[in-house]
Amino acid sequence: MAVKVVGAGLAGTEAAWQLARRGLDVDLYEMRPMRSTPAHRTGQMAELVCSNSLKSDSECTAPWLLKEEMRRAGSLLMEITSEAAVPAGHALAVDRELFATKVTGAISSNPHIRVHREEITWVDEHDGIAIIATGPLTSDALSREITRLSGSGSPSTPGVGVLGQSEHLYFYDSISPIVEADSIDMERVYLAARYGKGTADYINCPFTREEYGRFYDALLAAESVEAREWEKLNYFEGCLPIEELARRGRDTLRFGPMKPVGLRDPRTGKQPHAVAQLRRENLRADSYNIVGFQNHLKYAEQQRIFRMIPGLENARFLRYGQIHRNTYINTPMLLTATLQMKAHPNVLFAGQICGVEGYTESIAAGLMAGVHAAALATGSEPVAPPRASAFGSLVHYITHADPKTFQPANITFDLLPPLDDRVRDRAQRHRRQCECALREFDGWLSEIGANSLAADTRRMKFTARGS
Ligand SMILES: Cc1cc2nc3c(=O)[nH]c(=O)nc-3n(C[C@H](O)[C@H](O)[C@H](O)COP(=O)(O)OP(=O)(O)OC[C@H]3O[C@@H](n4cnc5c(N)ncnc54)[C@H](O)[C@@H]3O)c2cc1C
């Protein structure tokens, strides 16, 4: 019987691919384009809805470690990120259209994967194996179904996996605006990498003290969408709307997304008072996103205020910032370390809905769920990744956090186990943690027989492209 994967986003496509490359048949369900979400724009699989960056790819950083583990485990999406990469300094950023097109192509043409364009509203926990990878914008009907699967009698009972109904089980996230490249006044901006490290891929819009002051005052006074709801919104700390950050103090932005340090303007030789940075959206370099300017302002207000950014006086906006609900289950209560429901072991969760945060983390969770579902489908016992690895540390966090205050997390060194012996130098310590993680991870890959599959991944994708 085919394994059912619900949601063809980042996690669902990676999970489906992992199953297929192990020779298992997959029914992959995606509700777009018939029914969309507030953030998706297309019917493509694996659409990146906000930033086009998968964070740092500098060796021995925590995001790199997670990506490196995925590469070693034969991740389809990681392979495609390198084919769709755009220059972004130390970060791994992609041309989002090319990325989604390539993922959609590889999945749609895989002979083991049958794609169904329909919304799933119920999951039969007694009928085969299912992976739920419907993301932070899971449709309402399926959210209610997951509440049932979680065994919740009362929506307000903490720790029973109610989606989007208990105060601990959702929060709000926001996305940043994108402008057309040829509407940027290149006379007013400059290209530079922070501290001159790496290639100068970012466009920097420099503010004088006076310009910053005017911008800041306008931002604070700007009208938000659903202004009366402000008090109730519960934001993810890592992705605060810029106006929320600004409320914390006049200089908060200058220590955050508008940090000028290390960005000397080559024309004046001076460091500006503040800087707004623009990052390329695609390889054609015809659109740029305003990094860290995710917000919840009315569209007209965004146009008015972001045109106060030096160089963006005549900017044309391809997308405005917006806010969205982020749905996730109470994983510490509901899932095992192999992402199976404790109450229904044939139902697995993957991606942001299982309590990880971020593109890379969602793909990693999809990869793990695919591997575990494949084990279940072939009558083996799924094996959790080792605690010392980035995979294992993410899983350890989502399954061991305090259920009362559980919030999704990005991969950081804080999640990895500390080294036995104290290493004072931070870079040295991180290097040692990465070495240890990768050693353990490689052991896990051999244990689950993944090493022998690496060559197959590429062969299947070339077949898919060629067909
Ligand atoms: C607006 C927004 C901005 C974000 N910005 C960033 C960012 O900048 N950087 C970052 O690292 N992370 C960001 N995230 C967080 C997260 O990394 C992404 O949401 C990521 O896409 C999660 O991957 P996923 O596979 O879990 O979900 P998704 O990629 O959203 O995939 C889930 C899929 O399931 C489908 N679906 C939903 N319900 C059903 C149903 N009932 N039946 C069938 N299909 C269904 C959806 O259409 C979607 O295609 C953002 C999230 C949101 C919502």
Image (cartoon, helix red, strand yellow):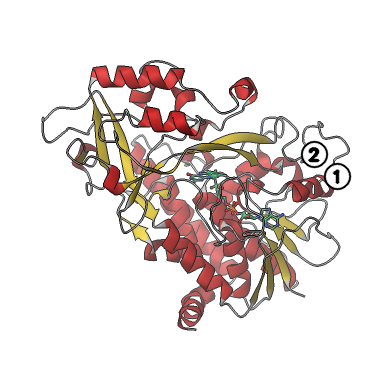
Q: Secondary structure at mark 1?
A: loop
Point out the tag, 2 or 1, that comes first from the N-terminus: 1
At a point 31% along the width and 29% down the height, the residue shown is: 259
Q: Please name the amino acid that badge 2 sits on.
A: Val
At a point 31% along the width and 53% down the height, the residue shown is: 286
Q: Secondary structure at mark 2?
A: loop
Quarter assignment of residue 285: bottom left
Residue 467 at x, y percent in the picture:
50, 84
Q: Nearer the viewer, residue 61 or 370?
A: 370
Q: Please name the amino acid that badge 1 sits on.
A: Gly
264 to 1, vertically: above or below: above
Q: Nearer the viewer, residue 185 or 416?
A: 185
Check the image and name the residue furthest to the right.
153
Q: Residues within 10 Å of mark 2 (few under 14, many from 20)?
A: many
Name the side, left or right, on which 305 lies relative to 342: left
Q: Nearer the viewer, residue 466 or 451?
A: 466
Quarter assignment of residue 125: bottom right
Q: Which residue is mark 2?
A: 160
Name the side, left or right, on which 227 lies relative to 155: left
Q: Which residue is mark 1?
A: 151
204 to 46, vertically: above or below: above
Residue 112 at x, y percent in the picture:
64, 78
Name the side, left or right, on which 19 lies relative to 266: right
369 to 397, vertically: above or below: below
Q: Residues within 10 Å of mark 1 (few under 14, many from 20)?
A: few
Residue 77 at x, y percent in the picture:
49, 63
- In what quadrant of the picture does the N terminus appear? bottom right
